[in-house]
Image (cartoon, rainbow, N blue to C red):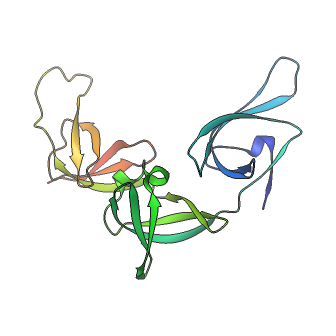
Amino acid sequence: MAILSYNEVTPKKIIVWNDAPYEVLSSWVFRKQQRKPVNQTKLRNLKTGKVVEISFHQSESIPEADIEKKELVYIYTNKGEAWFHEEGNPKERISIPEDIVGHQVPYLKEKAVVDALLWDDEIIGIQIPIKVELAVVDAPPSVKGNTAQGGSKQVKLETGAMVSVPLFINEGDVIRINTDTGEYTERVNKA
């Protein structure tokens, strides 16, 4: 377990705070007038999902969480649970409550490989690729008009997710989505 100084607590790192794993969402090191520097952070509890704001002072050190990764294959989501199986072993099924993986499920296709994050042999979350390619299954027709600044429309993807995209995207196109922000990044190919 690595020990981090106050200014090494940066976004995307996972630390142990109050005997629980927290993901650092944001951090800002600043100095208030003549005082010593402080790192103002926003942390998300990986077990409960609760977000808290914590200030780390110059004299503090924080342990980095020992997180193990295990490859899982996504099967489906039903009744508030996402179901996975171990890579190469479809009989070994694992269910993860949707509140732990809920914001990432809309970007998972059947048989997508993800990394499960384990802390003390307990699954506390999943890690999916930052960008995924999904097909557009329903797109309203583009409407000509005042689009000097560029227009956008809502389309439905093959996983059921709704995304705002430029007007030139049509049904059948494959597009790339940023899974951190849920935003359209580019068109991969035309229908």
Looking at the picture, tell me which residue is in the foreground, 157 or 173.
157
Residue 155 location (% of width, % of height) = 21, 42
Q: Residue at x 20, y 24 (%)?
A: 147
Quadrant placement of the C terminus: bottom left
Q: Residue at x 87, y 27 (%)?
A: 36
44 relative to 47, above or below: above
Residue 176 location (% of width, % of height) = 32, 51
In this picture, residue 49 sits left or right of residue 178: right
Q: Quadrant of residue 134?
A: bottom left
Q: Residue at x 29, y 47 (%)?
A: 161
Q: Residue furthest top?
A: 33
Residue 1 location (% of width, % of height) = 78, 62
In this picture, residue 61 sits left or right of residue 64: right
Work out whether residue 130 can be spotted. no
Work out whether residue 125 can be spotted. yes
184 relative to 2, above or below: above
Q: Quadrant of residue 188?
A: bottom left
106 relative to 163, above or below: below
Q: Residue furthest front?
A: 79
Q: Residue at x 63, y 69 (%)?
A: 121
Label count reads 0
Looking at the picture, tell me which residue is in the foreground, 44 or 77.
77
Looking at the picture, tell me which residue is in the foreground, 79 or 34.
79
85 relative to 160, above or below: below
In this picture, residue 137 sits left or right of residue 50: left
Residue 40 location (% of width, % of height) = 72, 32
